[in-house]
Image (tube, rainbow, N blue to C red):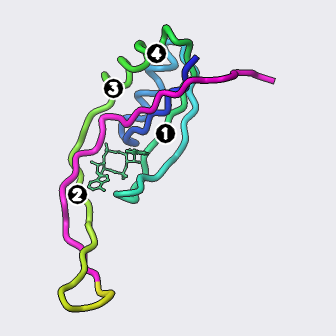
């Protein structure tokens, strides 16, 4: 069995949960925050049998889109210790950041 941890954009989360549930997968949705943008994103936990892994990956790939976002990157002001300003940088976020872990044990008590 595998545990899929998928970090996706909030805009895609609802459609992704619906698509996964429609195919019979169990999903847990967590409200999370990205460390770089400090903006909300969504993390989904999906436990699946090994042979269903590719089906879940296909759904994630199909639903999640990459988008460009503007982030404010802090930069030190020349010659002024501890003074920071920010300037806008464009980053491409997503489709999805996915971790696949082996599950040692799965029990429902
Ligand atoms: P954030 O950390 O808010 O990052 C949003 C996007 O900003 C990233 O998109 C990437 O394009 C850019 N970015 C991140 N760190 C950067 C840096 N040090 N310098 C320049 N640009 C940077 P994604 O790579 O698609 O990541 C989307 C979200 O997935 C991340 O949101 C974070 O919540 C999660 N994530 C990505 N890689 C991760 C990892 N190795 N471990 C845990 N979470 C991760």
Comes first in the chain, label 2 or label 3: 3
Q: Nearer the viewer, residue 13 or 78?
A: 78
Closer to us: mark 1 or mark 3? 1
Which percent across, then down, holds residue 97?
37, 37
Q: Are marks 1 and 3 in contact (CB under 8 Å)?
A: no
Q: CA distance from mark 1 to mark 3?
A: 14 Å
Q: Is mark 1 within 8 Å of ligand 1?
A: yes
Q: Which mark is residue 70?
A: 2
Q: CA distance from mark 2 to mark 3?
A: 22 Å
Closer to us: mark 1 or mark 4? 4
Crowd tier of the residue under label 1, counting other residues whose Cα lies within 10 Å: few below 14, some 14–19, many 20 or above: many
Q: CA distance from mark 1 to mark 4?
A: 17 Å
The correct choice, above or below, for 108 with respect to 36 in the image is above
Task: Name the residue beneath numbered marker 4.
Answer: 53
Q: Is residue 103 magenta?
A: yes
Magenta residue span: 84-109
Comes first in the chain, label 1 or label 2: 1
Crowd tier of the residue under label 3, counting other residues whose Cα lies within 10 Å: few below 14, some 14–19, many 20 or above: some
Crowd tier of the residue under label 4, counting other residues whose Cα lies within 10 Å: few below 14, some 14–19, many 20 or above: some
Residue at 30%, 35% (x, y): give it.
95
Task: Name the residue beneath numbered marker 1.
Answer: 43
Examine the residues drawn in magenta and state their main secondary structure. Answer: strand
- 99 with respect to 87 (left or right): right
Residue at 39%, 38% (x, y): give it.
8
- 13 with respect to 95 (left or right): right
Q: Which mark is residue 6?
A: none
Q: Is mark 3 within 8 Å of ligand 1?
A: no
Comes first in the chain, label 1 or label 3: 1
Q: Secondary structure at mark 1?
A: strand
Task: Name the residue beneath numbered marker 3.
Answer: 63
């Amino acid at each position: 069995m595998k545990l899929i941890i998928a970090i996706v954009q909030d805009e895609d989360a609802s459609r992704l949960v619906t698509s996964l549930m429609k195919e019979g997968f169990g999903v847990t949705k967590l409200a999370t925050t990205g460390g770089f943008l400090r903006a909300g994103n969504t993390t989904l936990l999906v436990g699946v049998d090994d042979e269903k892994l590719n089906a879940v990956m296909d759904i994630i790939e199909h639903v999640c889109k990459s988008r460009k976002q503007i982030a404010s990157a802090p930069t030190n002001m020349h010659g002024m210790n501890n003074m920071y300003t920010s300037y806008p940088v464009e980053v491409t976020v997503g489709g999805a950041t996915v971790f696949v872990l082996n599950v040692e044990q799965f029990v429902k008590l």
